[in-house]
């Protein structure tokens, strides 16, 4: 079993299709939706944690593509520029998942990508602009 | 006799009901005995400590390290053995900026309107002098770039576009200029920050139903978080609560260079309620600081943008505190659990916001505080990591004999009240 984070982008015409249902039912994947932007006649976006066997995840990705859905594995939901960071902690004030947290011994910022919801709220909360989108999905709320 | 003579000269020696021995009392390195306590009060003088620094024999530790030393050795031995304690802070400080002198063009111009990388700078000084304020936003890029970014670019040695306009005079005929400058092409460039190093500061939360974008960061609705901005037991003025050793002329670490305390900061308010250990329970004293921008590093001066609020600047300040006697030792060994502030509700649009809780810095740094029966996550805005780095750099400078302490030329005001601004009718005269 392996766990990945995936970004799915639905063209407006595909928003009505139950792709997630098929991912669970046909490929035996355990899915946790972290973020969803879905609206009629608009591009839909899903960010999800997917747990399953590697070959099932590959087949699911191929299935999504055949449905016209962009399926991308996200390594880093946001990109953290360690050199630029001043470790102030302002981003930790808004991070809902705890992926951005302070090490309370040496007071450096710790980023745990696996915990990130890809909500992108930290990007604008960072005063020195040390966090940027990790992939070219539209930031939430834009 | 010496004591009483000095007190008469000073004209006031009682500060909030307690005796304050001013730094300059130690001018002659005089030892004197307080009969009331019957023991030697003056352990060391500034001069004795500086002599040790020159000989590279001074014992220097940070305001965090001293806590453990006192625990292990006891306060009296610690006061004898330790000469200097370094303090530091690295937080966003909006009331900051820099004076620049561009030099004269040929033909010369008396600059009346000035822009640096499209950020407006003050044109109300002499021909080619200006002040660039950290919070001034760019006229082209808005809040993403401002005066603080210009300052950081200058520190980094980058070229900055200078545009200026003038009405033209007989002695300064040029009316426009458009050129590039950098820190090496101009004359003076010095930071002058009118209010830095706040002695304590309010913590912030938001009880409303919408997200607030403030200088205290993004405050989530329904008290979703609490932010705070002080380095606590490492913070300069919390380690010298009655300004015994920090005053006008004190040499400090400023942005990676040596700077000075120029004056008390604006809104300096020493008359705040205080805990038994002397630390104020609210934002109290402040410092105006000055230093050579050309020698600074953007590791310790960093431009910042607070979303939907504006531009600010992280300023790195380190201040050494001489352990003149037992009282100074006691002051510098203050701990986070004994320093308190209040959590204020920033959703109340008034200068008198309600305080929701009183909390210690130990609680704030633990990751959550109790607010209305609920644990609310906390987040710092001031970097303790960089503050520690600054305290360490300053410690190394002093230990290596490169940085001597200065006795204040004059003390900071020990009483002052901060006035509000009332909206009144009438005519200017």
Image (tube, coloured by chain):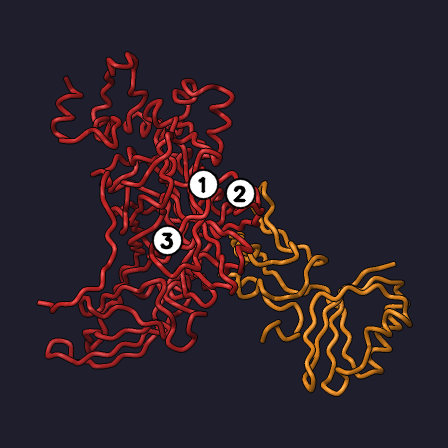
Please state if A109 lies on the left or on the right of B340 as rendered: right
Query: From the image, which quarter does the C terminus of chain B lie in?
Result: bottom left
Picture colour for chain A: orange
Nearest to N terminus: mark 3 or mark 1: 1
Please state if B8 lies on the left or on the right of A59 as rendered: left
Q: Name the residue at 72% across, 58% down.
A: A114
Mark drawn on residue B365: 2
Q: CA distance from mark 3 to mark 1?
A: 28 Å
Q: Could you say where residue B119 lies in the image, as x and y percent from the top left? A: 35, 72
Nearest to N terminus: mark 1 or mark 2: 1
Picture colour for chain B: red
Query: From the image, which quarter does the N terminus of chain B lie in?
Result: top left
Nearest to N terminus: mark 3 or mark 2: 3
Please state if B84 lies on the left or on the right of B406 as rendered: right
Q: Residues within 10 Å of mark 1 (few under 14, many from 20)?
A: many
Choose top left, top right, bottom left or bottom right for residue B366.
top right
Residue B404 sits above or below residue A60 on the image: above
Q: Are marks 1 and 2 in contact (CB under 8 Å)?
A: yes
Q: Do pointers 3 and 2 mark residues of a single chain?
A: yes
Instruction: Look at mark 3 in the image and give the residue it sits on.
Output: B295
Q: CA distance from mark 3 to mark 2?
A: 33 Å
Instruction: Look at mark 1 in the image and give the residue it sits on.
Output: B232
Is residue B284 in sight in this rendering?
yes
């Amino acid at each position: 079993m392996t766990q990945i984070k995936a970004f799915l982008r639905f063209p407006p015409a595909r928003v009505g299709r139950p792709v997630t249902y098929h991912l669970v039912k046909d490929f035996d994947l355990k899915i946790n939706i972290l973020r969803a932007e879905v609206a009629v006649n608009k591009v839909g976006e899903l960010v999800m944690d997917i747990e399953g066997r590697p070959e099932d995840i590959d087949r699911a990705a191929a299935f999504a593509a055949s449905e016209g859905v962009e399926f991308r594995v996200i390594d880093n939901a946001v990109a953290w520029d360690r050199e630029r960071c001043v470790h102030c902690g302002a981003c930790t004030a808004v991070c809902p998942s705890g992926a951005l947290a302070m090490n309370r011994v040496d007071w450096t910022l710790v980023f745990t990508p696996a915990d990130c919801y890809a909500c992108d709220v930290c990007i604008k909360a960072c005063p020195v602009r040390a966090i940027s989108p990790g992939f070219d999905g539209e930031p939430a709320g834009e | 006799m010496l004591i009483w003579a000095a007190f008469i000269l000073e004209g006031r020696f009682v500060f909030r009901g307690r005796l304050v021995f001013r730094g300059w009392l130690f001018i002659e390195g005089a030892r004197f005995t307080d009969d009331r306590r019957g023991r030697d009060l003056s352990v060391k003088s500034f001069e004795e400590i500086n002599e040790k620094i020159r000989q590279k024999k001074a014992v220097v530790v940070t305001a965090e390290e001293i806590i453990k030393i006192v625990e292990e050795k006891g306060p009296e031995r610690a006061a004898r053995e330790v000469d200097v304690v370094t303090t530091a802070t690295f937080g966003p400080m909006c009331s900051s900026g820099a004076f620049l002198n561009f030099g004269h063009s040929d033909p010369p111009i008396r600059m009346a309107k000035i822009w640096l990388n499209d950020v407006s700078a003050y044109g109300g000084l002499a021909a080619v002098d200006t002040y660039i304020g950290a919070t001034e936003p760019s006229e082209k890029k808005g809040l993403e770039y401002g005066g603080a970014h210009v300052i950081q670019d200058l520190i980094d040695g980058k070229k900055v576009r200078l545009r200026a306009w003038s009405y033209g005079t007989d002695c300064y005929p040029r009316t426009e200029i458009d050129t590039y400058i950098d820190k090496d092409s101009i004359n003076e460039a010095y930071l002058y920050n009118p209010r830095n190093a706040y002695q304590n500061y309010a913590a912030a939360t938001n009880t409303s139903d919408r997200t607030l974008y403030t200088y205290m960061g993004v405050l989530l609705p329904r008290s979703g978080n609490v932010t705070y901005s002080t380095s606590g037991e490492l913070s300069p003025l919390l380690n010298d609560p009655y300004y015994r050793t920090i005053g006008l002329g004190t040499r400090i670490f400023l942005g990676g260079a040596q700077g000075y305390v120029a004056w008390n900061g604006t809104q300096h308010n020493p008359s705040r309620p205080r805990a038994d250990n002397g630390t104020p329970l609210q934002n109290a004293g402040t410092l105006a600081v000055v230093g050579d921008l050309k020698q600074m590093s953007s590791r310790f001066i960093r431009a910042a943008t607070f979303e939907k609020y504006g531009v600010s600047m992280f300023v790195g300040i380190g201040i050494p505190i001489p352990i003149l006697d037992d009282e100074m030792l006691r002051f510098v060994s203050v701990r986070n659990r004994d320093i308190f502030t209040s959590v204020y509700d920033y959703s109340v649009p008034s200068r008198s916001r309600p305080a929701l809780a009183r909390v210690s810095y130990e609680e704030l740094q633990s990751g959550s505080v109790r607010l209305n029966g609920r644990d609310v996550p906390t987040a710092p805005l001031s970097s303790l990591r960089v503050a520690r780095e600054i305290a360490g750099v300053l410690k190394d400078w002093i230990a290596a004999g490169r940085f001597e302490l200065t006795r204040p030329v004059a003390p900071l005001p020990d009483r002052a009240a901060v006035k509000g601004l009332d909206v009144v009718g009438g005519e200017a005269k």
